[in-house]
Image: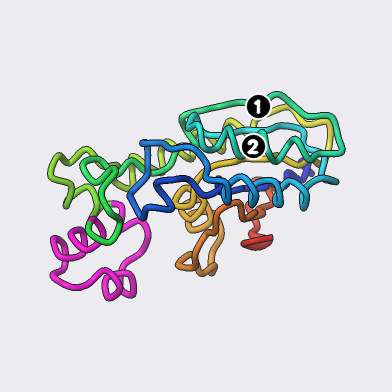
Amino acid sequence: MSPKIRLHLVRHGETYLNRYGKMQGWSDSPLTDEGKLVAIAAGQRLADTEFAYVYTSDSGRTLETAELILNESRHPVPVIHRIKAFRETFFGGFEGEYSKVALGQIAENNAGISFAELMQTVTVAEFADMTKKADPYHHAENFEELWTRIRGGLQTVIDLDYAGDANVLIVTHGNTIRNIVNQLCEGVDVTIEIKNASVTILEHEDGKFNWIGFDQ
């Protein structure tokens, strides 16, 4: 049997663009004071967990969150590896737009219905494709582009050297976490909110991923 690798997927703490209700994919903004507090609280919940490896996206908000989490650790802290693979979805021309405006435009462009109605009928993969279609510049990532990138990052983590069962901390983004769970774990409702600094846990063993839970 291969080692059991427990992935702790943490969404970054609240940022100023989150607070202002704006689309934030590859664009970045610092953590708010509340964002820092929830990151510290996540670190306190994880303080007794020893991590073999730590990964973040290359966004400043995930690095800031990871540092606050690791400051609470009661174990030696590994080097933080920052990789593009764990970035948030790129929203193209919708980056920085008010979320209500952007999501409404995406729904109207593709189906002529409201965003709430749309999300009851499409998968997260279909929504990524719809976002690219609705983006005036067509620079937004479609699902294939998004998942190819994320999958490469996950494979990097799984292929690391492990002495035995281990924990890995990956500080990333809400839609990235949603797509990981949606692709790797059957029967999980991924329409729920992925809260700032929440911990989603997956286990990998013998080539299979198992979902342990959201908001742990």
Along the horizontal axis of the image, is 166 left or right of 54?
right
Where 71 sits versus 119, above or below?
above
Q: Position of residue 202 (x, y in %)?
A: 65, 53
| Foreground disc of the pair 2, 1 | 2
Q: Nearer the viewer, residue 146 or 43?
A: 43
Q: Are marks 2 and 1 in contact (CB under 8 Å)?
A: yes
Along the horizontal axis of the image, is 91 left or right of 3?
left
Q: Secondary structure at mark 1?
A: strand
Residue marked by disc 2: 66
Residue 110 magenta-highlighted: yes
Residue 69 magenta-highlighted: no
Residue at left offset 44%, top offset 45%: 16
Q: Nearer the viewer, residue 61 or 182?
A: 61
Range of magenta residues: 102-128
Residue at left offset 29%, top offset 42%: 141
Q: Position of residue 163 (x, y in %)?
A: 83, 31
Amino acid residing under circle 2 = Ala
Where 176 sits versus 148, above or below?
below
Q: Pick whichever of labels 2 and 1 is earlier in the sequence.
A: 2
- For residue 146, what is the image quadrant? top left
Residue marked by disc 1: 80
- For residue 127, what is the image quadrant? bottom left
Along the horizontal axis of the image, is 70 left or right of 90?
right
